[in-house]
Image: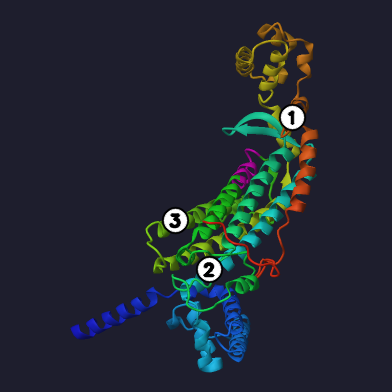
């Protein structure tokens, strides 16, 4: 019996050791990129006479058949072959025989996987830019439907000054605009081809990297083979951009959670984006916004995991880099649906104009306007600030708001107050903020028009697939461097 237990333990250990290095369960999603890179490589080998033209055609034909098999669901994945590369290569041997072995001439899995990952990151950056632009468009739609709706703006979650709802929504437009630009930079960082670097030192073959780069749509070629196979900075750029974008989504989601509560009542979400409680029939929980807020931590974690993986790696390729793809894939699978959900949630939301206005009216958001009034009468601002602070405390102690005070009340606070102080109201306060970037109706209308134009001009390229770059140009030299209640 002891011998049998020992044998069983050895079997389990062997199985564990075998499974430990397997990446096929997640890297198989790179099949499009892997096959596209292999096809471009095989064609180049044929053009350069490194393999014969017939061999090149046979390899390309076999790879195209494999791609069709994968997309039709007929491809038999073999975990014992560890990864996407060896599964495709093994099937190629089945289809065309020993000629398949010539595909890996002048190539290593090190530069192959780096190329696959860059192609994937580049395409998903384009997908993300499209989703961000779509979300921006939804924000503009909401703003344009509510051109005169006002509400209290907040600092420290305290009512501060009145603003237009459109102005508030345009703030998020700006956030997501910066996110889109960050993903444009992440796309550019990924748009450098490592293929042709070999394992780490370059290759002793007369390869044509420029033609491969053109076919794959790369605009630049990695200039140092050692850096090319070990560089994952482009992935960090992607994950960093995603983390910041999720932070912006989370801020918006937090406001939706607050605004949809009975305490605020500023917005009502459609039934499609709320859920009920298991025991409380009256509940309409903003679960989608809460999940968007919660998933932000997941994306942060992926960035930190990638940074931690990379921080201790010596040159050049190390198997630790196998960990990079799960971080990227999980972030893609989190960020893209979150952006779509957020846009859908906003498009079906109804803003409660009366409740927002009442929240502004039943507050002291005009205090700054009163201080500015005294400044225009010649009082230094710091002194005016103190006068209005005392006036505000007086109103609070009497259970009144500033607009409830009489002219006599104002004149007791300062002799500079005249009858026209009673003309200060929410609309006047908003209209007075008529500087560039301010919340006045004129400035917000101009900002909405400008935002529409920016959005139209910023539409990302269509496709998001392989070879999205200009195939006719020669690659440029790279720079040097629901549960619960």
Image spot of residue 247 (x, y percent): 56, 48
Q: Residue at x 39, y 76 (%)?
A: 19
Q: Would you place residue 383 above or below residue 177 in this image?
A: above
Tell me the residue that label 2 is attached to.
Answer: 194
Mark sitting on residue 435? 1
Please give left or right for residue 453 compared with residue 249 in the image: right
Distance from the alpha carbon under mark 3 to that under mark 1: 43 Å
- Of 281 and 158, which appears nearest the observer? 158
Q: Is residue 257 magenta?
A: yes
Mark 2 vs mark 1, foreground winner is 2
Q: Is residue 1 visible?
A: no
Asked where in the image residue 162 lies, by quadrant, the reply is top right
- Say if the magenta span includes residue 261: yes
Instruction: Answer above or below: position of 50 versus 368.
Output: below
Q: Is residue 161 above or below residue 285?
A: above
Q: Quadrant of the N terminus?
A: bottom left
**Secondary-structure class at tag 1:** loop
Kindly identify the residue that appears in the image at 30 percent across and 82 percent down: 11
Q: Is residue 280 above or below residue 167?
A: below
Looking at the image, residue 81 sits to the left or right of residue 40; the answer is left
Camera-nearest label, 3 or 2: 2
Mark 1 neighbour class, 10 Å CA radius: few under 14, some 14 to 19, many 20 or more: few
Please indicate whether residue 282 sits to the left or right of residue 195 in the image: right
Q: Secondary structure at mark 2?
A: loop
Residue 95 location in percent, x, y? 56, 92
Q: Which mark is residue 307?
A: 3
Label whose residue precedes the other's in the sequence (2 or 1): 2
Give the magenta range.
252-264
Tag 3 secondary structure = helix
């Amino acid at each position: 019996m002891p011998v049998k237990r020992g044998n069983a333990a050895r079997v389990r250990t062997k199985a564990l050791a075998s499974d430990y290095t397997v990446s096929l369960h997640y890297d198989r999603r790179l099949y499009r990129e892997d096959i596209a890179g292999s096809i471009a490589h095989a064609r180049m080998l044929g053009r350069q006479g490194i393999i014969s033209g017939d061999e090149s055609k046979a390899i390309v034909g076999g790879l195209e058949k494999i791609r069709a098999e994968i997309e039709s669901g007929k491809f038999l994945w073999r975990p014992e072959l560890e990864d996407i590369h060896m599964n495709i290569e093994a099937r190629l041997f089945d289809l065309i025989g020993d000629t398949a072995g010539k595909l890996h001439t002048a190539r290593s899995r090190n530069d192959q996987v780096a190329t696959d990952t860059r192609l994937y990151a580049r395409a998903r950056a384009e997908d993300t830019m499209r989703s961000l632009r779509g979300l921006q468009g939804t924000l503009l739609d909401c703003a344009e439907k509510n051109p005169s709706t006002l509400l209290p703006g907040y600092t420290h979650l305290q009512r501060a000054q009145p603003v237009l709802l459109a102005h508030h929504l345009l703030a998020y437009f700006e956030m997501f605009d910066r996110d889109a630009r960050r993903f444009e930079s992440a796309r550019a960082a990924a748009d450098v081809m490592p293929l042709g670097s070999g394992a780490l030192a370059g290759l002793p073959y007369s390869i044509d990297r420029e033609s491969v780069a053109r076919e794959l749509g790369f605009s630049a070629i990695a200039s140092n083979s050692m850096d090319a196979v070990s560089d994952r900075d482009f992935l960090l750029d992607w994950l960093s951009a995603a983390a910041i974008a999720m932070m912006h989504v989370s801020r918006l989601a937090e406001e939706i959670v607050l605004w949809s509560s009975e305490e605020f009542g500023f917005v009502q979400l459609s039934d499609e984006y709320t859920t009920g409680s298991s025991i409380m029939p009256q509940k309409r929980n903003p679960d989608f916004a809460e999940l968007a807020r919660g998933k932000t931590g997941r994306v942060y974690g992926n960035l930190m995991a990638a940074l931690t993986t990379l921080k201790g790696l010596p040159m050049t390729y190390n198997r630790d880099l196998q960990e990079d793809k799960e971080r990227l894939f999980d972030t893609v699978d989190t960020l893209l649906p979150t952006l779509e959900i957020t846009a859908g949630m906003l498009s079906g939301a109804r803003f409660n104009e009366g409740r927002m206005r009442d929240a502004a009216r039943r507050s002291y958001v005009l205090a700054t306007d009163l201080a500015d009034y005294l400044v225009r009468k010649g009082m230094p601002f710091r002194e005016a600030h103190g006068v209005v602070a005392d006036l505000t405390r007086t109103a609070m102690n009497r259970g009144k708001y500033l607009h409830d005070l009489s002219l006599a009340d104002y004149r007791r606070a300062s002799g500079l107050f005249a009858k026209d102080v009673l003309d200060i109201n929410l609309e006047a306060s908003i209209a007075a903020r008529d500087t560039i970037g301010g919340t006045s109706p004129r400035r917000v209308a101009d900002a909405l028009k400008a935002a529409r134009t920016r959005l139209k001009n910023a539409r990302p390229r269509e496709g998001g697939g392989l070879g999205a770059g200009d195939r006719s140009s020669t690659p440029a030299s790279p720079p040097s461097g629901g549960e619960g209640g």
